[in-house]
Image: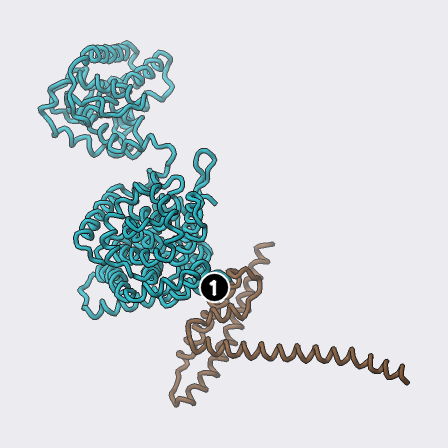
Amino acid sequence: MEAEKEGAEEQQGLFYRQRLKAAVHYTVGCLCEEVASDKEVQLSRQTIAAISEVTFRQCESFAKDLEMFARHAKRSTINTEDVKLLARRSNSLLKYITEKSEEFNVERKTKKKKKLEDENKDSLEPAEAGGVGSEN
Amino acid sequence: MADSDISDNEPTTRTLLRRVLDTEAPRTPRRRQSTRAGVQRTPLGTPFSMRLRSQTKTTAGRQPHRARSIGRLAHIQTRGQLKEQTPRTLLENILLTAPESSMVMPESAVKPVPAPQVVQFSRRESSPGSLELQLPELNAPTTLAPGRLTSGRRKKRLRLSEFQQGMDQGLPLSQGPVTEPPGNTGASSLSSSLNLTFATPLLPQSVQRPGLARRPPTRRAVDVGIFLQDLQDTSVATALPGDRTPVATLPTDTVLEDTQPFSQPLIGRSPSVHHSLPYPSLSAERTVSRRTRSSGPGLQNNSPGKPAQLLAGKAEEVDALAMGFPNTSSSTSGEDGVEPLLGGVGEEVEERMEESMSLSEVKEAAGAQASARAEEPEAHTEVAEAEGSWGAIEEKEPEGSSRDKDTEGRTARPELASSTPEFPRARQLEFLEPAPPTSTAVLSSEPLEPLSARLPTRVQTARPRLRQDSYKMGLSHYAKLFSFYAKMPMEKKALEMVEKCLDKYFQRLCDDLDVFAAHAGRKTVRLEDLELLMRRQGLVTDRVSLHVLVEQHLPLEYRQLLIPCAFSGNTVFPAQ
């Protein structure tokens, strides 16, 4: 019974994996077409398949590394720091990621500020209304 | 002889038969006799080897012993004959009467008796390792001294008993002079086999370190020691920076081996443990114990060398040796550079440490001094670099562990010497920081902040040169290894490219270590960082853990530093 269940789960896992791979392959294919039209070169199907396979495996490796990094920093959640550590090898990518993350942080801060301001206003308005009302 | 024993390879058939005869539950009269015989034989066995080894000759007093032993033998023999003819008795008679091996001299019935006894004794008493040694040697000694065979079996027996007593009492072996070579070829062969057992005298007696049996062959240690000595001599003579031989971890042929986690074994057990690994331990000790200026250069050399070696740890022995040159040179320079920084604080500590370390370090100091002086201004960054490069060698685990040990040891040392705890830690930080470009950063790290000002001024001038010399030497060593394993002739340019690649590779490894440590919010590289690095390299997987790698590749002394072992007296080493 349990073996069967495990087998079924494995089957499902494999299924899931295949679907993931197909999705990756499709995306890689789209990107390759863009690059091909951009550089005006032809990319054969085998090439695209190879690239997608490599991408998939690399993603697996990335995931494991990210988990290791997070655990190394004694966290249970993967952080942007972990991602930056992962991307440290390629300078341009690292730059890009850090810029994006900074933008994101800035956005978050502005959002937070807005929220706080809104809350303050909300709290003030009823008070004012109350004050006005009392005045009246 | 007996068919039953044919299958056994290691022990001789005779010994096996003997064993069978003795251990099997005999019918009562047999039993008593066999045990007694066995007991009687063992004393005879021991003195044989003793005598042979010492090769001295004693005269008086043997004959009474001989007579006794002969009497014993005769007693045994007669007993055997009295029994009914069982297979056991037959075997026993065979053992008693048949020659142990091809005999040069004609033998009397008495002669073979001591041989089996001797064999038995050797079998029983010697460690498994020595037992193995017996067989090949059995025939060799027969040719050794044919002239000796004639004289004193009697004396030999005496010696056996004497030796036995001496062994029991723990007396030195030298007391029993080896007078006459065994009369029989068999006896001589047996005695020679016994000699072999003595070749490793400490094995059976060292209960405290059972792992010694698994140590790598001692020849390695000797080679390293001699080699290092030669190197030191040459370095002293030439006073060239690059000549310094690295303290070097024991050279290992495999790539992954050798860590040099020597940090603090010195505290308790290091002297004995590290005896076989003189230089690495010495260097380690040195780094911990800042030597005073006078002995400093040599010592200093070692101390940076130690961390370097610690980093190199796993490096192959050959690599370690090769790299040791640059390490030692760089270490000396690094030490010198560091010294002014810590001079005020460290001197007292150093002196104290020195005293404690003096024995081990004297050697290195002497060798290192010359080289150290030459390289004084060497920046410790170079050392760090060298260390980093060494550390980058495949297994970085020892680095991490060694670093940990270093911290532990260093802190322990100052405690022992009641010196400032920051002192060694600062040193460790200095040495452990891998990338040379980060040297200034290293300098500014915790305890070094007040001292950083001094170090850069001193070091800057000589740093590039040192880096080139020692570092390049290490890289060239690797390149040579590469060309060896390539099994093909290689162009010089190809070797240069290999060096370049190695350079970048090691730099990257050390940077990774640095980054990992920073990622965890730390400034010190620790074992976890190293393990993470190895995991990324694929050396440590879900199936293969770090401990497994340590156990697989490291010699016992190193392993003890990484994997805590419990020693007698409720002590755990390394102390955690």
Q: Position of residue B393 (x, y in %)?
A: 34, 59
> What color was chain A assigned in the picture?
brown
From this viewpoint, is residue B235 visible?
A: yes
* Quadrant of the rendering where the N terminus of chain B is positioned: top left
User: Image quadrant of residue A122?
Assistant: bottom right
Q: Position of residue B180 (x, y in %)?
A: 14, 21
> What color was chain B assigned in the picture?
cyan
Q: Position of residue B450 (x, y in %)?
A: 43, 61
- Return the residue nearer the eye: B105 or A126: A126
User: Image quadrant of residue B150?
Assistant: top left
**Subunit of label 1:** B
Secondary structure under the numbered disc 1 in the rendered image: helix
Q: Name the outermost residue toward the left.
A: B147
Q: Which residue type carries mark 1?
A: Ala
Dot 1: within a 10 Å radius of its alpha carbon, few (fewer than 14), some, or many (20 or more) residues?
some
The residue drawn where x is 46% and y is 37% is B571
Q: Position of residue B555 (x, y in %)?
A: 34, 45
Query: Would you name the residue on which mark 1 appears?
Result: B518
